[in-house]
Amino acid sequence: MAGSGREEEEAWASGLPPEGSASGSARIALYPGSFDPVTLGHLDIIERATRIFDRVVVAVLQSATKTSLFTAAERMSLLEASTQDMSQVAVTSFDGLTVDCARNVGASTIVRGLRAVSDFEGEFQMALMNRRLAPEIHTVFLMTSLANVFVSSSMVRDVCRHGGDISGLAPAPSILALQKKLRP
């Protein structure tokens, strides 16, 4: 039997299903990404995923080959602050294969956000590889809302770096963190 109350909340907060839970009975989705930093487009996908799935585990990629502005711990903190009102959301980090992370958190679905048709080809290739590696894990694509079609983390970083207004593109925690790092 799964833990109750505080123990269960702490287990979910770690990004893992509570010990002894029947992860097959809860619809758990993994939303992986770099989130460097989290944008309103990311939050749009997360919020809509919570309407479809019982739990959404947002997984921050720790990549040795990709240079990030924020550390994995900073990105996790920004996500936690930005999703604190979403009780079904847990934040974790991973390094390695996305399907391994999905298995570790008990997810049967990987959620990916699409902004435009140009995103689809790369996302489709990743989804096919993930399916080859783990046929039991499905990939679901969610289109971002029209207001966020042009929003990307790299664009938000660039606009901030050059003194532009990024309100309406990123949540307050990301805006403050970007301004602190990019505007000494």
Image: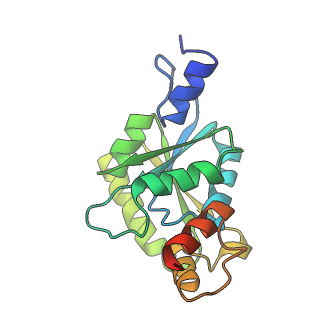
| Residue 64 sits above or below residue 25 on the image | below
Camera sees residue 151: yes
- Does residue 95 sit above or below 162 in this rendering? above
- Picture coordinates of residue 10 (x, y %)? 54, 27
Q: Nearer the viewer, residue 70 or 47?
A: 70
Farthest top residue in view: 1
- Can residue 32 be seen from the camera position used here? no
Image colouring: rainbow
Give whichever of 164, 51 is nearer the camera.
Answer: 164
The quadrant holding residue 43 is bottom right
Residue 124, position as x, y percentages in the image: 44, 66
From this viewpoint, which residue is outermost toward the left? 65
Left or right of 144: which side holds 72? left
Q: Residue 62 location in percent, x, y?
A: 35, 56
Which is more toward the observer, 44 or 182?
182
Q: How many marks?
A: 0
Q: What residue is at 37 percent from the left and 59 percent from the top?
A: 128
Q: Position of residue 151 (x, y in %)?
A: 61, 76
- Residue at image location 50% in from the left, 62% down from the top: 35
> Image check: 140 left or right of 48?
left
Q: Which residue is pictured at 43% across the width and 44% down the height?
A: 137
